[in-house]
Image (spheres, grey):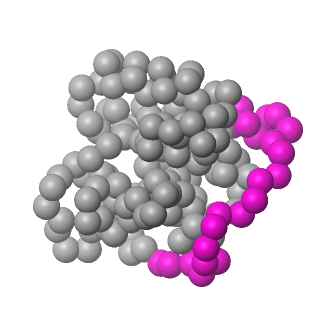
Amino acid sequence: AWLIRRFIDPRATFAFSDQRRDAEVSFDMFGGDFTHEADRCTFEVLAERFAIRDPIVSRVGRIVHDLDLKETRYAAPETPAVAHMVEGLRMMHPDDGTLLEQGIGMFESLARSFAATDVAPTSPPRGSTRTTAVPRARHRSRKARG
């Protein structure tokens, strides 16, 4: 959700539902418009499809990848702390909407902390550089991940 609001559609709204309504774009759910593909999590798929080449997005994406796919492919030193923060937010906010907004704030804080330090250049997202337009619509998710 942070990636969508920050880089794709700052006015995006999010609904938590198993049923799609017209003009909605679903993500991070089985059969969604944007979901896991091959060995990539939804965050990585979105960054690739929208040609987001910001090194901070790549850095956050590696953390999200390892958390979402329960891997240690990138083993960023921040990943365990971010995992604890996400779990703490889940404990504090049983309401999905509140959890989502707090999670967006947490990832924005993380991104700003990376921007304040020397962020090493990263390789661009794998695949196409083509940008895909998403209508200004309600985005849906079943999770409150970056």
**Residue 98 lies in quadrant:** top left
Q: Can you give x and y, in whole percent of width and height, for residue 82 in the image? A: 54, 27
20 left or right, relative to 81: left
Q: Can you give x and y, in whole percent of width and height, for residue 78 in the image? A: 64, 28
Q: Can you give x and y, in whole percent of width and height, for residue 48 in the image? A: 58, 67
138, above or below 17, in the image = below
Q: Can you give x and y, in whole percent of width and height, for residue 118 in the image? A: 86, 38
**Residue 77 lies in quadrant:** top right
Q: Nearer the viewer, residue 140 or 80?
A: 80
137 left or right, relative to 129: left
Question: What residue is drawn where x is 60% and y is 42%?
Answer: 73
87, above or below 129, in the image = above
Residue lying farthest left? 19
User: Is residue 11 something one can see in this rendering?
Assistant: no
Question: What residue is drawn where x is 44% and y is 56%?
Answer: 42
143, above or below 31, in the image = above
76 left or right, relative to 24: right
Numbered marks: total: 0
Determine if the magenta segment contains residue 80.
Answer: no
Question: What residue is drawn where x is 61% and y is 78%?
Answer: 128
Question: What residue is drawn where x is 45% and y is 37%?
Answer: 70
Determine if the magenta segment contains residue 128.
Answer: yes
User: Is residue 94 something one can see in this rendering?
Assistant: yes
Q: Main secondary structure of the magenta part?
A: loop
Stretch in magenta? 112-133
Q: Nearer the viewer, residue 7 or 54?
A: 54
